[in-house]
Image (cartoon, helix red, strand yellow):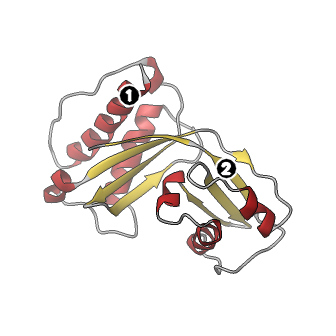
Amino acid sequence: MTGDALGRTLLTIARNAIARRFGQTPPPAATGPELSAPGATFVTLTQNGRLRGCIGSLEAHRPLATDVAENAVAAAFCDPRFAPLSAGELPLTRVEVSLLTPAEPFEFTGEADALARLRPGIDGLILTHEARRATFLPQVWETLPDPQRFMAQLKLKAGLPATFWDDQITLARYGVQKWKES
């Protein structure tokens, strides 16, 4: 399956999974061996360009098709930042699927070094400190293009102060291949 065909299929799987929760019976998505291989995805829902839900997996631990379907349902109904999606909202909702590359440890000597090594628009970032962990997809650079603001907001997402830094912080970065409904 080509990249574009895979993207169309993943978008269909995501939308169909949500539609089935409303009792709809959408036509089946295409199939292929890629969908049975483990994959890590995030499904992002937007309405009028504004976030409406986003849930995902950082590690590939189940078949790609299953990961997309379950993350789509979770983004629609379980994102704690939003009320569950209603059936009337589904036609107004755009789906985006991000297929993650495996995360790689990100080496740095301190916060200034980490900020200097970040690749805006390319890096997805996972920040971990003790039991706290948060991630931003590379797409977040579109709204937070400054590395310092990007990192500050990621720390806030992890439940840490924006100015917090500790030598025990670990970072990992990943890339994505993404597809979005038009």
Q: Out of 4 and 44, give the one closest to the viewer.
A: 4
85 versus 68 height, above or below: below
User: From the viewer's perspective, is 148 left or right of 18?
Assistant: right
Q: Out of 159 and 47, give the one closest to the viewer.
A: 47
Question: Where in the figure is residue 160, as x and y percent of width and height?
Answer: 65, 77
Whichever of callouts 1 and 2 sits on the residue coming sooner in the sequence is 1
29 versus 160 height, above or below: above
Q: Are marks 1 and 2 in contact (CB under 8 Å)?
A: no
Question: Where in the figure is residue 171, as x and y percent of width and height?
Answer: 72, 57
Tell me the element at label 1. helix
Give residue 178's quadrant in the image. Answer: top left
Q: Residues within 10 Å of mark 2 (few under 14, many from 20)?
A: many
Question: Where in the figure is residue 143, as x and y percent of width and height?
Answer: 47, 64
Residue at numbered disc 1: 4
Q: Out of 76 and 167, give the one closest to the viewer.
A: 167
What's the CA distance linking mark 1 and mark 2?
A: 24 Å
Please, what is the three-letter code of the amino acid marked with disc 2?
Answer: Arg
Tell me the element at label 2. strand
Residue at numbered disc 2: 173
User: From the viewer's perspective, is 133 left or right of 3?
Assistant: right
